[in-house]
Structure formats: C-alpha cells, structure tokens
Image (cartoon, rainbow, N blue to C red):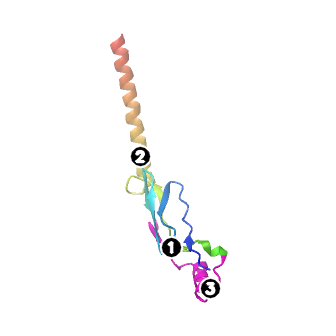
Amino acid sequence: DCRELRCDAPYEPVGVWGGDTGFNKTLRLRCNEGYVPSKGAVELVCNGSSPAMRSALLHASSGGPLPALAVAIPAWPGQPVARCVPGGGSGDAGSWREGLRMSAMWSCASVVALAFVVVVACA
C-alpha cells in the first residue's frame, strides 16, 4: 500500500505557511505586512522526526500497510515554530504601537490643516 505521507501545516492567523506538505518537503512562513516572524523555525521540513511519523515509516518499511492516520501527521511536535508578531522589523510590539500612534497623529494633523485651509479659502 503506497500512500504519500504528508505533514499538517501549522496554523498562523496573520501569515501563511507556504510550500509543499509532502514528505521531505519544506514549508516557509510568510507574515502579512506589518508582521515579522519571531521565536522559532521559519522553515519546517516534513520528515520522520515525530513519533507518529517514525512509527508509520517503520510499519510501512517492514511490509505492513500504511495506517490511514499516517496520511496527514503533525511532523514537528516539540520543535519551536515561529509565529508572526507585530513590528516593522524588530518584532517589538511597543515600537509597532508607537509607530501606529505617530501615523495616526500625522493623519489627524493633516485633516485639521486641510479643514483650516478650506475654511480660510471659503471665507
């Protein structure tokens, strides 16, 4: 029984794990704009590192049928997986908030200045 072993891609709410989930293939984390990867592996290789994957490979190599649960196996338990966090490049949420606040202040000042110019021009 030859079935392709595949790994489950980790869930990331503000990014995407792109690539092939097939055995010995690589997934790469791409974060949405304004977010950066932090604290973990940005690339994951689907291999026999998990106990479930090793068991399925050993069973299949001894001539036994590949168990149905081996079709999609989490292959990186215990391996720290990167997460997308706010930050232009530092991954620091405080600096990201400060940048957002400054952007909001400049936008507000621009709107007030424009309203002033319109009022003066129309008066």
Percent coordinates x, y for residue 102 in the rendering: 39, 41
Q: Nearer the viewer, mark 3 or mark 1?
A: 3
Q: Circle 2 — which element? A: helix
Q: Earlier in the sequence, mark 2 or mark 1?
A: 1
Identified at 60% across, 84% down, the residue is 60
Residue assigned mark 1: 46
Crowding near pointer 1: few (<14 within 10 Å), some, many (20+)? many
Task: Farthest residue to the top: give it.
Answer: 123
Residue 11 is tagged as none
With 65 as the anchor, is 109 left or right in this view? left
On screen, residue 117 versus residue 91, left or right, reads left
Question: Where does the image place residue 84, in percent across and percent down from the top left?
Answer: 47, 58
User: What residue did someone put label 2 on?
Assistant: 98
Q: Disc number at residue 59?
A: 3
**Residue type for callout 1:** Cys
Does the rendering let one see residue 57? Answer: yes
Which image quarter holds the C terminus? top left
Magenta-colored span: 39-67
